[in-house]
Image (cartoon, helix red, strand yellow):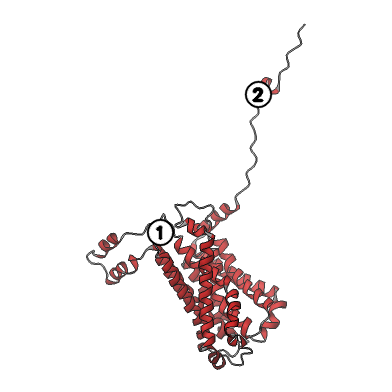
Amino acid sequence: MSSPKRTTPSEGSPRRPSRKAPSVPDVSSQLSCTREKIPSPARFGLLVLSSLVLSSALFTLTSAITVGDLSSVSKHLENWWEVGGLIAWRAVELGLAWIAGFDGRDVFFFTLLTHVPTFFLLLHFYGVRPTTIVTSFTIDILSMTVPFMLLRRPSSVHSLSGARSESVSNHGILQDRLTSIYTSVAASAIFSVFLYLSYYTWLPAFLVTHFEDIPDIRVVHAGPAGLPGLFLSLLVEGYAARDLLFVSSAGWSAEEKSPSSKEQSAVADRQGEYLITSVYNRTWGTLSRKTRILITRTVLLAAVTLLNTIVQVSGTIKGVDVQGSAGWGAIWAAAQLTIGLMFGWIEAVPGV
């Protein structure tokens, strides 16, 4: 007698459809969709409001660290227009970065470069503690950067690992570590040379004249012995300039082709064209896209650095006149323009 044949579940019963594991929602894609639903003017309004609220909240939370040191060198703002002017300038900073198409990483380095003259002055000439400097500087950077990270998607040049090679020019150059080191060190050296030459020539007398009761100017008399320390202290600024200027211009979107010179000349020769349009097409329009990006960012960086130094130093530090803050800011702005020229010279090499 044969034993009954056993049937396995796969043979005797119908297969149940396999259940797929529930997919984890992609937070970044959801955030991107939410951003796109908000109109651009409303996003900019949220940007300014969130930046001011975040800055105020962080300074309130860290008041035990910052108030004691900063109160001894800060002006007491009693008039409403003085406070309103600082708030309006913050809105202008954010607006310029927004119009320029900066993403969160761009704004991080942009804020670092435009605000460093003020904090460098407080640290080396007014004896403010490093903990206070780091705290205040971090709050300025975060209150500018975080709203941009939430309200604007990052550019492809800042996500090279996931970007297609067709979407970013000079993909290999931007990922090369030696190139990153060389360009960052060169930018830091330019900052150091400009400051050192100012220390050695006109700045000591200028500080005494336009910075009333400035506590300490020993750093300008350090001589060649102080140059290595000055260079090392500016390495972060050199890397920031490299990322903001060189990376964004050398890595411009390869998918967006600029019109050829022949096409621009044909457009310029149309009958009835305005003179300003013809001049534009024959000058700025003939430049490559990466050159236009580099020039725009360099000029914007230098201008905002100079203006921010005037507003912050003259408006918040006791005993400093406008001419003094403008002279101090001009050193940094001139260095940034020179760094932009250096990056333009690098990008002029065939194949870059």
Vertical side of 319 occupied by 269: above or below: above
Would you identify the image quadrant in which residue 349 lies? Answer: bottom left
Please identify the quadrant where the N terminus is shown: top right
Q: Earlier in the sequence, mark 2 or mark 1?
A: 2
Give the crowd class for mark 1: few <14, some 14-19, many >=20 residues within 10 Å: few
> 256 or 86, which is in the foreground?
256
- State the residue lying farthest toward the front: 225
User: In the rendered view of the protein, which quadrant contains the C terminus?
Assistant: bottom left
Vertical position of residue 329 compared to residue 292: above or below: below
Q: How far apart are the two marked residues, 2 and 1, measured between alpha carbons?
A: 63 Å
Q: Are marks 2 and 1 in contact (CB under 8 Å)?
A: no
Residue occupying the point 57% across, 92% down: 208
Give how far across and how far down residue 167 sits, in percent. Answer: 45, 54
Image x and y of residue 181, in percent: 54, 65
Residue drawn at x 71%, y 18% as measured from the top left: 7
- Residue position marked by numbered label 1 in the rendering: 351
Horizontal arrangement in the rendering, residue 197 relative to residue 22 (left or right): left
Query: SS class of the residue under badge 1?
Result: loop
| Res. 310 visible in picture | no
Amino acid on which disc 1 is placed: Gly
Q: Which mark is residue 174?
A: none
Q: Is residue 271 above or below residue 159?
A: below
Where disc 2 sits, the SS reads loop
Seen as rendered, the residue at the extreme left is 271
Three-letter amino acid code at the position of disc 2: Pro
Of the two numbered discs 2 and 1 in the rendering, the one whose residue sits closer to the viewer: 1
Q: Which residue has dot 2 on it?
A: 14
Image position, residue 65 (x, y; %): 71, 77
Q: Closer to the camera, 49 or 298?
A: 298
